[in-house]
């Protein structure tokens, strides 16, 4: 006789196993190690392209921070001139100078961090380029 509860339990288990195998296969197929073994030249070309983009973005981010630093200096000069004749000038000038220095220090720290990150990305790019040349020849 046909037992529907047993049939559905088996069907559920088989479907679950199939989905697990399918998902595992997808993860393996898209893994970097598998792609590197399957097609090393294509893998390293993609890696070089990704790293070149990261290096380029790092350059843009550093330039943006340098512009912000220059902007901070200009704004400080404008504020100092604008509030030069203020009656609370000494206290205000000190607060303004302190705030300006804090902003400058923060921007300089960000520039240093982005520069370190740029160096790391450039090292990775150089390594990827050497792998690409090794695989290509």
Image (spheres, rainbow, N blue to C red):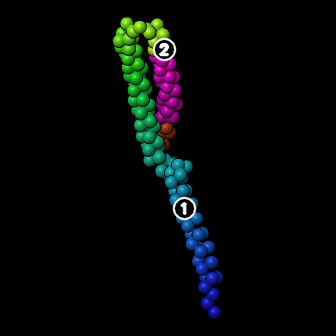
Specify few, some or many for label 2: CA neighbours under 10 Å numbering under 14, 14-19, or 20 or more. few
Q: Earlier in the sequence, mark 2 or mark 1?
A: 1
> Can residue 52 be seen at all in this image of the molecule?
no
Residue at the disc numbered 2? 95
Residue 100 rendering spot, x and y as whole percentages: 46, 16
Q: In front here: 120 or 126?
A: 120
User: What is the magenta segment's predominant secondary structure?
Assistant: helix
Residue 75 rendering spot, x and y as whole percentages: 38, 17
Q: Residue at x 60, y 69 (%)?
A: 17
Q: In front here: 100 or 116?
A: 100
**The disc label shown at residue 23, or none:** 1
Tell me the SS state at disc 1. helix
**The disc label shown at residue 47, or none:** none
Specify few, some or many for label 1: CA neighbours under 10 Å numbering under 14, 14-19, or 20 or more. few
Mark nearer the viewer, 2 or 1: 2
C-alpha gap between disc 2 and disc 1: 59 Å
Q: Residue at x 44, y 47 (%)?
A: 42
Marks 2/1 in contact by CB < 8 Å: the verdict is: no
Q: In front here: 64 or 22?
A: 64
Q: Magenta residues? A: 97-125
Which picture quadrant has residue 49? top left
């Amino acid at each position: 006789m046909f037992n529907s509860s047993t049939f559905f339990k088996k069907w559920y288990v088989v479907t679950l196993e199939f989905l697990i195998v399918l998902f595992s296969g997808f993860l393996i197929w898209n893994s970097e190690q598998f792609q590197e073994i399957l097609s090393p030249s294509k893998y390293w070309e993609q890696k070089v392209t990704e790293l070149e983009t990261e290096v380029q973005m790092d350059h843009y981010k550093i330039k943006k921070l340098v512009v912000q630093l220059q902007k901070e200096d200009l704004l400080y000069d404008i504020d100092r001139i604008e509030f030069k004749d203020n009656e609370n000038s000494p206290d205000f000038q000190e607060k303004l100078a302190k705030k300006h220095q804090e902003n400058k220090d923060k921007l300089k720290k960000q520039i240093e961090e982005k520069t370190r990150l740029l160096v790391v990305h450039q090292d990775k790019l150089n390594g990827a380029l050497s792998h690409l040349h090794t695989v290509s020849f």
